[in-house]
Image: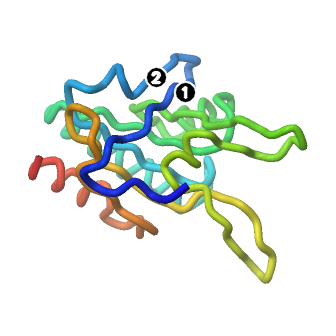
Amino acid sequence: MPLIDPGKKAPAFNLVDQDGVRHRLSDYTDGPVVLFFYPKDMTSGCTLEAQQFRDLHTTFKKKGVTVFGISILDSKSKKKFAEKESLNFPLLADDHVNDAGKPDPKVCQKYGVWVEKSMYGRTYMGIQRTTYLIAPGGKVARRWDKVKVPGHAAEVLEAVGAL
């Protein structure tokens, strides 16, 4: 599926976080929501990105923003990652697998971030690092594609001020 353009309704989700708590987008329509899709728990770029959102989380909360990180690994992996990095926001597990046992993340597909990637001549499916800012009411206000991690969380926070 294609990426969701600003102005369009954000696709619904219903995922479990690192503590087993279920989160639905429909539960957060009163304020802005940040969804940052990242490839894998506990890798260098993903750790840096999560740490930046952690460090700015108090400021996001003061502005009424809910922040979620989403990737394909299960809630057990998310728990380990959150505890190791003292993360103070939910990490959601889009960990559905197909009949062949391969990752088949439903929410990542809805948001257009589950894409074919290549490394060292090998192609595989994975998450393209993407962030969505969803305005109160559920429409996409802004999207960042192929995110460069340094300074990204601060850039998202700045965009929240423009809502």
Residue 144, quarter of the rendered image? bottom left
Whole-angstrom CA distance, mark 2 to mark 1, is 5 Å
What's the residue at 46%, 42% (across, down)? 69
Q: How many numbered callouts?
A: 2
Residue closest to the eye, 162 or 77: 162
Evaluate if marks 2 and 1 touch, with contact meaning CB atoms under 8 Å apart. yes
Q: Residues within 10 Å of mark 1 (few under 14, many from 20)?
A: many
SS at circle 1: strand
Whether residue 114 is visible, yes or no, is yes
SS at circle 2: strand
**Residue identified by numbered label 2:** 23
**Residue identified by numbered label 1:** 15
Quick check: 67 above or below 5? above
Residue 96, quarter of the rendered image? top right
Residue 136 in the image, given as x and y percentages of width and height: 20, 33
What's the residue at 48%, 31% (across, down)? 13
The amino acid type of the residue labelled 2 equals His
Residue 19 in the image, given as x and y percentages of width and height: 56, 20
In this view, which residue lies farthest toward the right?
A: 100
Locate residue 163 relative to residue 14 in the image: left or right: left
What's the residue at 11%, 46% (across, down)? 163
In this view, which residue lies farthest toward the bottom?
A: 121
Locate residue 158 relative to residue 19 in the image: left or right: left
Residue closest to the eye, 125 or 49: 125
The amino acid type of the residue labelled 1 equals Leu
Residue 17 in the image, given as x and y percentages of width and height: 54, 26
Residue 3 in the image, given as x and y percentages of width and height: 45, 58
Quick check: 115 above or below 86? below
Whether residue 54 is visible, yes or no, is no
Residue closest to the eye, 100 or 129: 100
- Looking at marks 2 and 1 on the same chain, the residue that comes earlier in the sequence is marked by 1
What's the residue at 81%, 76% (across, down)? 122
